[in-house]
Amino acid sequence: MYRFLALASSAFLWAASNLAAPPEVGKVLPPWQEGTLDIHQINTGHGNSALFIFPDGTTMLVDAGAIAKRTPGMTPPRPDDSRPPGEWIARYIAMALRGRKEVALDYAIVTHFHGDHMGDLGGFMPQAEGKGYQLCGMTEVGDRVRIRKMLDRGWPDYPYLPDVSRPSLANYRAFLKWQTEHNGMKVERFQPGRNDQVVLQHQREKYPTFELRNIAATGEVWTGLGSVTRHMFPPLDAIPAAERPTENMCSIAFRISYGRFDYYSGGDLPGVPMDGKPQWHDMETPVAKAVGPVEAAVANHHGYFDTQNEFFVSALRPRVWILPSWGACHPAQTVLYRLQNGGAYGPRDIFATEIHQATRVVLAATSKLASLRGHVVLRVEPGGETFRVMILDDTSESLQVKGVFGPYDCR
């Protein structure tokens, strides 16, 4: 049985009268309502995690980061360190889905096999009793909230693993084995080019403009034509060891479309090859050619120095950037410049999950961000013509709205 959460506070009790309420600063975020697309970028201080509620109520989680080793260069754990990040994420999911008969995820995606996206094994990680795996990041979320289908870049044989922590991946695979054998979970390899692998589960025919398009994984990138893809990596046996693709380069990327609203997310894909590396290490450029303009985009690799190249920024030119930052090196100064000023396009707002205090001191331009900290929630209105951004308090489980931005018109 799954340990669904009894949230005692009346602030979390669902009421039909609240369904149509607009978000207000100081109030609890109104629950999702049918026809609306909600995207929650969750701040735990341990890595990336995003919850999606599609227009018909279909649910999806992308990543559940849980970095085991804390350093002064990391932002504090949110809401605090009394629970592990996987448990906080599971509790957030339960709050966001309050009022449902069952708190469950129709889909979950691990964009790539790094701890800040899937969970690290380190220190004391409790065992899932009788199940053969430890609770960490995605495995802890999946132990608490039912996941019906899991997608990653390597299932079932995981042929190319450049620099991943073997114990963490072995634990994740043990989790998949138990869940598929005992709980009915389905697991698939994420296949670039497809638009029928993640689909609405409840009223698909009612929302014909909704689509999740698989863009990239493990160096295979959609061309934008039908379901045709290209392999961007040369044959691995022909590449010197020092030039082989990194795990970040293998990240999953996708685009969500709903009416006129488009959204991009691409894990830790790099776009600025490091010194001495070949140009094909730039994964952002071919991805950007396939994605095209969007209304909102998640900054690749937390805004690290090897991302958001000029072509990528100008090709996507989102009105809203989401910066899933958790370290003092997020974002790099050059990246922040491109996000704020580069790309030769119009106004844009940047919302960060949290800017480290040291980064605020060193990079004065962070003061121009629309938000420096909190859960970042995009709420797309029914039909996909407009959307708002809400910043939620991340120091508690109140879902209290700290800021409201928009409405933004979709192009």
Image (spheres, rainbow, N blue to C red):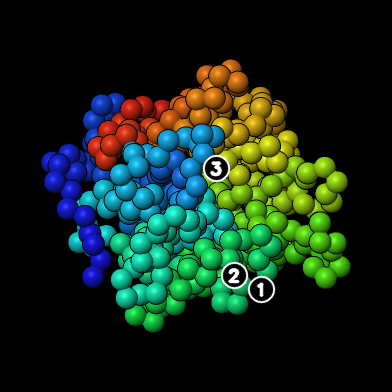
* Between discs 2 and 1, the one toward the N terminus: 2
Image: 399 above or below 268: above
Give the Cα separation between the discs numbered 2 and 1: 7 Å
Q: CA distance from mark 2 to mark 3?
A: 23 Å
Q: Position of residue 299 (x, y in %)?
A: 58, 40
For the residue carrying disc 1, how many other residues have a C-alpha within 10 Å: few (<14), some (14-19), or many (20+)?
Answer: few
* Left or right of 77 in this view: 92: left
Give the residue displayed 75% in from the left and 49% down from the top.
282
Mark 1 or mark 3, whichever is nearer to me: 1
Pick the residue in front: 366 or 261. 366
Disc 2 is placed on an element classified as: loop
Q: Earlier in the sequence, mark 1 or mark 3?
A: 1
Residue that numbered label 3 is attached to: 298
Residue at 56% across / 32% down in the picture?
328
What amino acid type is highlighted by mark number 3? Val
Q: Is residue 154 above or below residue 270?
A: below
In this picture, is 404 found above or below 375? above
> Residue at label 1?
159
2 and 1 marks in contact (CB < 8 Å)? yes
- Mark nearest the camera among 2 and 3 is 2
Say whether disc 2 or disc 3 marks the residue closer to the N-terminus.
2
Q: Amino acid at mark 2?
A: Gly
